[in-house]
Image (tube, rainbow, N blue to C red):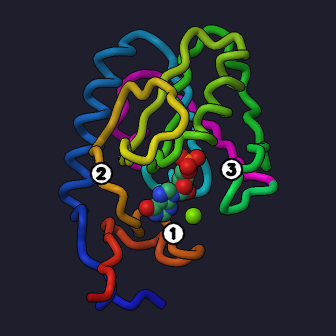
Amino acid sequence: MLDHRSFTQYLSRTDIDALIQDIAGRINKDYEGKTVVLVGVLKGSFLFVADLIRHLTVDARVDFVKMSSLGKTKESPGTVVFQKDVSTDFRGKHVLIVEQIIDSGRALKFLYERLKATQAESVEVVTLLDKTDKRMVDTPVKYVGRKTKDQFLVGYGLDLEENSRNLGEIYYLKYPN
Ligand code: IMP
Ligand code: MG
């Protein structure tokens, strides 16, 4: 169970809604008359995808991927592989990769290259949160909800050892002392 005493609220439901409305407004303008496919990165993005897609007025489809890093250790980032790949025909469509948070960017880079190799008209990245200071591998990110410091966040899809994804708001861990 979540111990609220160790969490401090970072973004309220109102803050999250405002970020999503802003991103959706930009997408609706940029992709008017086009078909977009949101490719949500599991598991973290499932709530963000659900909320974002309801604010889109352009033709929107949805797909999901799940990746994992094989052989990841403290010394090595390991190799990124798909646990679930996309299953969409991207011809004539515009892909928007939807991330909840970008950290090192390694998994994102792998996915970006994979989707660039399809016949999609374009591939861009949307993220609710961006830990820019942690970036190891660069991929262009077109839509960023909020840049954030290197602090561990939970809630609204983000987990602490698989718990707390169900929280409606985003919290950061208060470190002892
Ligand atoms: P990257 O490949 O290093 O960019 O990994 C990003 C992934 O790490 C995200 O999709 C999350 O699953 C996880 N992650 C990164 N930062 C946090 C955090 O603050 N809280 C929870 N999960 C995080
Ligand atoms: Mg996690």
Q: Is residue 163 one of those drawn in magenta? A: no
User: Toward which corner of the image does residue 65 lie, by quadrant?
Assistant: top right
The residue indicated by pointer 2 is 148
- Within 10 angstroms of label 1, few (less than 14), some, or many (20 or more) residues? some
- Nearer the observer, disc 3 or disc 2? 3
Amino acid, disc 1 = Asp
Judge: label 2 CB < 8 Å from ligand 1.
no
Residue 159: numbered disc: 1
Which type of secondary structure does the marked residue at label 1 adopt? loop
Q: Residue at x 38, y 48 (%)?
A: 131
- Nearer the observer, disc 1 or disc 2? 2
Could you tell whether 117 is left or right of 35 in the image? Answer: right
Separation (CA) of disc 3 from disc 2 = 22 Å
Q: Quadrant of the C terminus?
A: bottom left
- Within 10 angstroms of label 2, few (less than 14), some, or many (20 or more) residues? some
* Observer able to see residue 157: no
